[in-house]
Amino acid sequence: MSHLPDPASTVRRVRVHHLAQAKQRGEKLTMLTAYDYAVARLFDEAGIDMLLVGDSIGNTMLGHESPIPVTVDEMIPPTRAVVRAARRAMVVADLPFGSYESSPEQALATAVRYLKEAGAHAVKLEGGKRSAAQIRALTDAGIPVVAHLGFTPQSENTLGGHRVQGRGDEAAEILSEDALAVQEAGAIAVVLEMVPAPVAARVTEILAIPTIGIGAGPECDGQVLVWTDMAGMGDWSPRFAKQYANVGQLLTDAARAYADEVRGGQFPDEGHSFLD
């Protein structure tokens, strides 16, 4: 029997202890990105456990080539919108590049803004041992933290682009040590991105907290995808992202039909006009 709140019968919030219970019970966790009220409401009603307001908003919504240019001020409004839409899902928001690396104090100041100004339930930051002090500071202040290991998009320049991480015995060992370090610091879960499936399975086995995979194989405790990849909103998506619909084509077709009817005088008709 699931220990997660049932999306079909209740609106009880998914909380930290539900994530731990899910791992203990072998129940897979679900996470999708969301950047606005309308999409977040649909995903929440669909029963998604966690909504991630990712700094991937830079790529998907703001037109940047990477998430690096995204600022805290740009993250607060979408986080606030997603929180307003989510009745059940836990809302996790990314701390963008440059907003937490300098010190635990900087990380805490940024995370406090997310909770006070946007109502986020948890925050996510990248890095293993190097971010342990920040994770500890946030945890001690009562702010739940999701860690992010493997391919970390904010470090893509150092990593040499979008490359699988954790290949080879030495790299796998370092990844495992980083995972244990963030757990010890107080992280409530770990996102593993673009990691060989056997390595992700090993990390999942040694951790007491859940792992959330994205391009990390089926043995993680949960999965996350960028929603525009999942729904087919573009002409490209990563190899690991399964496309469950072609929403982009549907929107294009709808826009063309609308334009054709306006230009041809079919819209608005009497049924879509006030006649008295």
Image: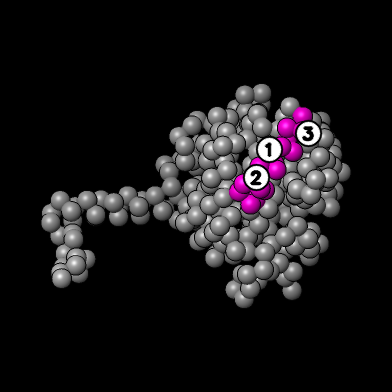
Residue type (three-letter) at the residue carrying disc 1:
Thr
Count how many numbered circles sit on residues in the image: 3
Q: Which residue is mark 1?
A: 110
**Which residue is rendered at x = 19% and y = 67% of the image?**
274
Instruction: Work out whether mark 3 precedes mark 2 in sequence or the reverse, and give the earlier one.
Output: 3
Q: Secondary structure at mark 3?
A: helix
Label pair 1/2, CB-CB below 8 angstroms = yes
**Which residue is rendered at x = 53% and y = 56% of the image?**
40
Q: Which residues are magenta?
A: 103-120
Give the camera-side residue of 114 and 160.
114
In the rendered image, the vertical position of residue 191 relative to residue 37, given as above or below: above
**Which residue is rendered at x = 67% and y = 48% of the image?**
115
Q: Which residue is mark 2?
A: 114
Residue type (three-letter) at the residue carrying disc 3:
Pro
Taking the view exactly as shown, the residue that stands out farthest to the left is: 265
Q: What scheme was used to colour the molecule?
A: one colour
Q: Label 1 vs label 3: CA separation?
A: 10 Å
Taking the view exactly as shown, the residue that stands out farthest to the bottom is: 9
Residue type (three-letter) at the residue carrying disc 2:
Tyr
Q: Mark 3: give few (<14), some (14-19) or many (20+) Cα within 10 Å.
A: some
Q: Is residue 202 visible?
A: no
Judge whether residue 77 is colored magenta: no
- The spot of residue 2 in percent (x, y) is 72, 70
Q: Kindly identify which numbered label has been placed on residue 104.
A: 3
**Which residue is rendered at x = 45% and y = 49% of the image?**
232
**Which quadrant: the N terminus?**
bottom right
